[in-house]
Image: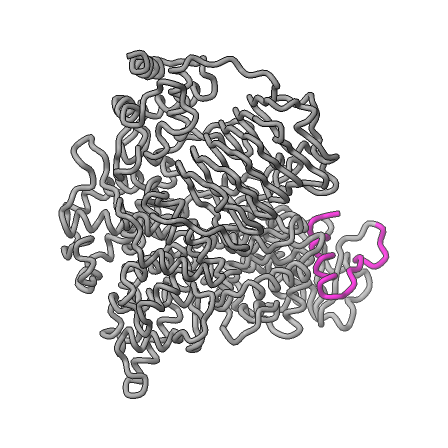
């Protein structure tokens, strides 16, 4: 069967007509045909090769008798015509050759403007890449929730090529998961562009879902209407999708009509799966992790975007494109720069000195990005680009301290505010001319601060509307200055920092980047009197109970505080909101405690409430007792480094991706909790793990751990990974136990027994104390990767509070002495006084020599007998100190 016949079969099925042999009832037909109106579309059995002048059978071969009287035109479909033929080649009266793509557009009755409108949509989506030499940067894909028997991704190092490959496949529902600014739109647009250029039998349908008007529904008919297809045409287009003729690339499910409603998004995803799922359909949808969690797995294939690492050339090329683009428009913005940003940016324009320093500014961004760039997104690159240009152009401030000294490292809140203010400066040029004077950047920033509260509020009762906030922030009388008011509120609804294209006054603002929203929340907490139409107490209460505010309390506020203790008013607001039953406030409390530590927190924290989100928290050196006990809250992706945890019982809590490193756990029970969970170099005494659930194998991973106490037990009476998966519940590497192995495991679903490898009843021989000391000292820099069976990763920096903590041997040097020893080998405080940076970090200018040192340390951490030259010197320093 030829590809062209297959195309005809799928088109006939889409149109609900019969595909017939030509000539009729021929054993080896010359072609296959379908009739649509007065046109007979024919698909030759042996078409010419692309690029070669086609030679098609004459009419008398197709119709040995007369051409049917109701056929006025015969069109022969060729996969691709020669370049000089266009989409159509006339062979004679009533007889012509058309390309496969032309047949798709004609038979599906798509608007004549379809290809041009798609080209413009893709071109608009790719606009941010125009200053990048050689086009968009190369992204990769990683598959989430991948099972051991799943095949690897095809060409996953080139994400756009991977999506195109899927688009040529059959029966896939693909969800591209990434947070705002990571390139979802550019990726889908690039894939659509490649598919349009290279695949002649499938039409890409690129649809930015944020273009759906607010008053529209969110069904397929509304999506089809965006490309000019209505009524029966929408159903025909849907059948074309199910037959693999059209590949929808639906960008931004989280941005539908500028609204975010979990139920609405979940219903839409379910509708898409129901409508599109079929053996030949391929549908590609993009959105954020929040939406990905609502997908029915394994019905959907969920993939995440992997942007280049900061040390890769592709990342630097991206950085340079952003810096060059910002430098071009810098002078247009300096005159309108808000006064409060003068210290950060100055007020001078770009000159030749700065243009000659573009590469140096790019080097600085690449160097500090692993520390400040919390996400590899345009948002953080743009914020750093603004600060870098501003320090050199506006303030003539250095980007590094001395020729070979550490780099200047801005606070994360400064980077967030820098990116946000430049978005506001650009918005001034987009608003109607009559409102341009009113639409000042400082007023926009004040309004965005108010919008962040509306976007994060769990209870919107008695809150002002967005338009009421706008009138107050810009000082506009809606009655007497109605034209200005309308222009401003229209621009607010389609602001570059927000989702919406258009909105009524009661809409709920939604920010494209959680970092933007959370930085404004932090600003509101530090200055609660500056938000329009809200009192100080109202602002404090709204921020304390803010939904999805992890970034505010885990990163931005701690950076703003520096070494200062937490403000009493913040703690009071958090306690009050949590006492009223706010799960969000409970999660925010714990996030702040993890980030600043118990000493700076200054008071106890209440147990987490059900559904509290403490995901992604980093506890370092904390002493945690029964106050962490609770049920049904979320700890996903949190890290506990050198913590002492005792008398804690978690029931039905989600601990997916949680790691415990160098911790002492005593009387800790996990009952019905979600994994997978990693324990590295931990002492576990009287700990219990019962009836775990896990999306990954194993549910429990223990590396270099020690089990103590007769009541330490792992019990599994029900499936952990699904009824059809008999994988072992736990994996052990280099672990020892005082508990007899036959008593340690129980239940029919552990799939563990006394022959378990990696776990011995005998104690391992003690290492030389200075070797053990160095390994424990370095361990925070070199944690084991989750689910990697021992693969070691390297960090650029750690908190100083992790240094010298954990299971150190007797006589080990204290933190001050260990810090001095490491500093002799290139470790340094770098940009933050409470952090220690590794010599290979960009902040310290790490080069090839430092990266080789990193490799030597990784070898030592993997095998303590592999002692290189530098490791030998480190060991001697520690030994001398321990023996002195």
Residue 814: percent from left, percent from top: 31, 25
Q: Nearer the viewer, residue 417 or 306?
A: 417
Count of marks overlaid on the render = 0
Residue 480 position, x and y percent, is 28, 88
Residue 622 occupies which quadrant of the picture?
Answer: top left
Image quadrant in which the C terminus is located: top left
Vertical side of 800 occupied by 135: above or below: below
Residue occupying the point 64% across, 53% down: 296
Q: Nearer the viewer, residue 581 or 403?
A: 581
Color style of the picture: one colour
| Nearer to me, 495 or 158 | 495
Magenta range:
1-27
Left/right placement of residue 797 relative to residue 233 reads left
Q: Position of residue 432 (x, y in %)?
A: 30, 75
Residue at 32% over, 21% down? 813
Q: Is residue 24 inside the magenta stretch?
A: yes
Please tell me whether residue 511 belongs to the stretch shown in magenta: no
Does the rendering let one see residue 124? no
Q: Is residue 818 left or right of residue 161?
A: left
As rendered, which of 837 and 495 lies closer to the eye?
837
Q: Residue at 18% x, 43% y: name it.
A: 356
Rendered location of residue 678, percent (x, y): 54, 34
Let me know if residue 395 appears in the view. yes
400 up-or-down from 774: above or below: below
Residue in the image at 50% along x and 29% along y = 682
């Amino acid at each position: 069967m030829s590809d062209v016949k297959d195309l005809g079969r799928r088109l006939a099925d889409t149109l609900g007509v019969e595909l017939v042999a030509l000539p009729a009832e021929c054993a080896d037909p010359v072609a296959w045909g379908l009739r649509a109106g007065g046109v007979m579309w024919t698909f030759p059995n042996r078409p010419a090769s692309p690029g070669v002048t086609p030679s098609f059978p004459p009419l008398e071969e197709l119709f040995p008798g007369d051409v049917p009287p109701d056929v006025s035109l015969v069109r022969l479909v060729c996969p691709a015509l020669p370049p000089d033929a266009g989409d159509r080649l006339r062979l004679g009266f009533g007889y012509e050759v058309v390309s496969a793509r032309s047949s798709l557009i004609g038979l599906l009755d798509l608007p004549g403007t379809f290809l041009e409108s798609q080209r413009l949509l893709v071109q608009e989506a790719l606009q941010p890449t125009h200053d990048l030499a050689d086009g968009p940067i190369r992204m990769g894909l990683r598959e989430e929730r991948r099972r051991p028997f799943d095949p690897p991704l095809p060409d996953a190092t080139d994400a756009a090529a991977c999506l195109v490959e899927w688009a040529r496949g059959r029966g896939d529902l693909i969800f591209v998961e990434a947070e705002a600014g990571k390139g979802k739109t550019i990726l889908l647009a690039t894939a659509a562009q490649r598919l349009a250029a290279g695949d002649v039998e499938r039409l890409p349908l690129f649809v930015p879902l944020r273009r759906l008007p607010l008053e529209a529904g969110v069904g397929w008919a509304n999506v089809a209407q965006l490309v000019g297809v209505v009524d029966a045409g929408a159903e025909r287009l849907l059948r074309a999708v199910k037959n693999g003729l059209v590949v929808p690339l639906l960008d931004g499910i989280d941005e539908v009509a500028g609204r975010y409603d979990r139920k609405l998004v979940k219903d839409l995803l379910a509708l898409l799966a129901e409508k599109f799922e079929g053996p030949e359909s391929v549908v590609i949808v993009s959105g954020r992790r929040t939406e990905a969690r609502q997908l029915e797995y394994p019905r959907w294939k969920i993939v995440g975007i992997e942007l280049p690492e900061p040390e890769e050339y592709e990342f630097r090329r991206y950085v340079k494109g952003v810096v060059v683009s910002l430098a071009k428009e810098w002078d247009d913005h300096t005159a309108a720069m808000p006064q409060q940003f003068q210290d950060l940016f100055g007020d001078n324009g770009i000159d030749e000195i700065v243009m000659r320093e573009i590469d140096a500014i790019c080097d600085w961004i690449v160097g500090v990005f692993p520390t400040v760039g919390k996400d590899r997104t345009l948002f953080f690159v743009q914020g750093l680009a603004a600060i870098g240009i501003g320090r050199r152009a506006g303030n003539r401030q250095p980007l590094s301290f001395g020729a070979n000294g550490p780099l200047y490292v801005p606070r994360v809140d400064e980077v967030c505010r820098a990116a946000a203010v430049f978005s506001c400066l650009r918005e001034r040029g987009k608003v109607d001319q009559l409102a341009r004077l009113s639409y000042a950047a400082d007023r926009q920033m004040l309004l965005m601060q108010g919008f962040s509260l509306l976007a994060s509020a769990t209870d919107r009762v008695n809150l002002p509307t967005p338009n009421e906030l706008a009138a107050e922030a810009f000082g506009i009388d809606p009655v007497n200055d109605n034209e200005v008011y309308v222009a401003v509120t229209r621009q607010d609804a389609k602001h570059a920092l927000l989702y919406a294209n258009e909105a009524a006054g009661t809409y709920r603002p939604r920010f494209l980047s959680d970092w933007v929203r959370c930085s404004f929340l932090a600003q509101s907490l530090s200055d609660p009197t500056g938000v329009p139409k809200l009192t100080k107490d109202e602002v404090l209460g709204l921020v304390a109970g803010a939904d999805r505010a992890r970034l505010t309390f885990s990163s931005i506020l701690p950076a703003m505080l520096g070494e200062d203790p937490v403000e009493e008013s913040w703690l009071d607001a958090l306690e009050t909101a949590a006492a009223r039953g706010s799960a969000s406030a409970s999660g925010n409390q714990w996030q702040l405690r993890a980030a600043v530590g118990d000493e700076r927190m200054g008071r106890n924290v209440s147990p987490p409430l059900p559904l509290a989100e403490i995901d992604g928290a980093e506890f370092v050196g904390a002493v945690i007792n029964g106050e962490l006990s609770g049920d049904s809250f979320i700890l996903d992706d949190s890290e506990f480094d050198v913590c002492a945890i005792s008398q804690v019982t978690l029931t039905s809590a989600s601990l997916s991706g949680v790691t415990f490193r160098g911790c002492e756990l005593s009387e800790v029970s996990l009952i019905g909790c979600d994994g997978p969970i990693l324990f590295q170099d931990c002492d576990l005494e009287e700990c219990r793990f019962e009836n775990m659930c896990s999306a990954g194998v194993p549910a429990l991973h223990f590396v270099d751990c020690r089990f103590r106490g007769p009541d330490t037990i792992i019990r599994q009476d029900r499936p952990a990974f699904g009824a059809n998966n008999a994988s072992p519940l736990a994996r052990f590497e280099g672990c020892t136990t005082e508990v007899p192995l036959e008593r340690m495991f129980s239940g029919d679903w552990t799939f563990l027994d006394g022959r378990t490898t990696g776990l011995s009843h005998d104690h391992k021989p003690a290492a030389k104390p200075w070797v053990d000391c160095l390994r424990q000292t370095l361990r925070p820099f070199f944690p084991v990767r989750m689910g990697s069976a021992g693969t070691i990763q390297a960090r650029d920096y750690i908190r100083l509070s992790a240094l010298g903590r954990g299971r150190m041997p007797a006589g080990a040097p204290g933190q001050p002495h260990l810090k001095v020893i490491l500093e002799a080998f290139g470790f340094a405080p770098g940009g933050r006084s409470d952090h220690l940076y590794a010599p290979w970090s960009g902040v310290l200018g790490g080069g090839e020599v430092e990266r080789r040192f990193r490799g030597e340390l990784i070898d030592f951490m993997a095998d303590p007998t592999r002692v290189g030259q530098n490791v030998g010197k480190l060991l001697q320093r520690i030994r001398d100190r321990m023996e002195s």
